[in-house]
Image (cartoon, rainbow, N blue to C red):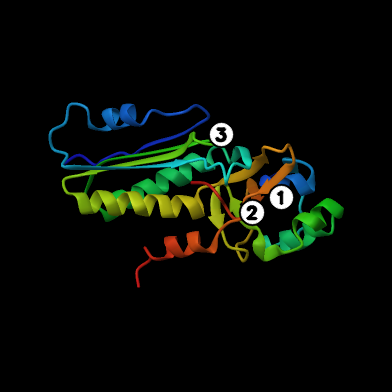
Amino acid sequence: MKLIYFAWVRERIGKSEEDIDLPSSIRTVGDLLGWLKSRGEGYEQALQVPQAIRVAINQEHVQHNEPVAGAREIALFPPMTGG
Amino acid sequence: MAPVAPFVRVQAEDFELSAEVERLAAGRSDIGAIVTFSGLCRDEGGTLSALELEHYPGMAEAEMTQIANEALVRWPLQGLSVIHRFGKIAPGENIVLVIAASSHRQAAFEAASFVMDYLKSRAPFWKKEHLLDGSAGGWVDARESDDQAAARWQPK
C-alpha cells in the first residue's frame, strides 16, 4: 500500500511517500497511525498527536475509524491551510 | 437549462482576474450578477518574503470540483470558477480566485463565500512561510475560525 505524506508530516517523517505492507492486525486508520508511530523517531514526532492528523484514502477525506482494507493510497497530512 | 459545469484549475502560474471573468461570462446576456473573490499573499507586517503552497495533486482538483458542484446544487448559478495556485507566491500576488455568476446577487455572494469557506477546511493545500530575514518560517497553523466558517453552512 502506498502511503503519502504532506507538509510537516512529510518533513518530520523525512520522506514524501513509501510503499508498506501493513500487518493484518491493522484494520482502521487509527490502528495505522498507532503502528506507524512506532517505526522510528521521525514517525513518532510526526504522529505524536494523532488527533491533529488528517487522513485521505484514495484521495478522499476519511475519519480515523475508517477501515483501511482495499485502500490503494493513504495520505497523512496536517489540517489544511489553503485559500 | 443545461447543467452548469464548474471551471476548476490548480496551477503554479498567476491568473488574470478580468480574463477569468471574461471566460465565464463572454457572449452571455443571462447573467445578472458576478461575484469575484481573490485571496492574496500578505506580507505579515513586512516580515514575509514568500508563502510556499504545497498541494496534493489529483485530490486538490477533485476536492475543489466536489465543493464547486455542491455550490451548484445549493444555489441557482450560471457559472462558477475556482482557481488555486501552488508553489512559491510573493506578497501581493494572487493565491486563489472564486467567481460565481447568477441571475441575482444573493446567490452569487453566498455561493462564493461557501466555496471559500469549504475550500479552506477541505482542499488539500498547506502554506509554509519564508521570512525576509532568511530564517526558516514555519507551517501556517489551521485556524479554528475557518472550521467554524465552514460549519455555518451545515444544515441546522
- Foreground label between 3 and 1: 3
Chain for disc number 1: A
Locate residue B94, reporting x and y percent: 46, 35
Locate residue A62, reporting x and y percent: 56, 58
Which of disc 2 and disc 1 is earlier in sequence? Answer: 1
Locate residue B133, reporting x and y percent: 71, 38
Frontmost residue, B134 versus A61: B134
Q: Which residue lies under the disc numbered 2?
A: A78
| B49 sits to left or right of B111 | right
Q: Residues within 10 Å of mark 2 (few under 14, many from 20)?
A: many
Q: Which residue lies under the disc numbered 1?
A: A9
- From this viewpoint, which residue is outermost toward the left? B29
Work out whether disc 3 and disc 2 sit on a shared chain.
Answer: no
Q: Residues within 10 Å of mark 3 (few under 14, many from 20)?
A: many
- The answer to whether residue B152 is visible is yes
Marks 3 and 1: CB-CB under 8 Å?
no
Residue lying at 67% horizontally and 46% vertically, measured from the top left: A7
Task: Please state, as top left, top right, bottom left or bottom right, where the C terminus of chain B lies in the image.
Answer: bottom left
Locate residue B154, reporting x and y percent: 38, 66
* Three-letter code, disc 2: Pro
Residue lying at 56% horizontally and 37% vertically, measured from the top left: B57
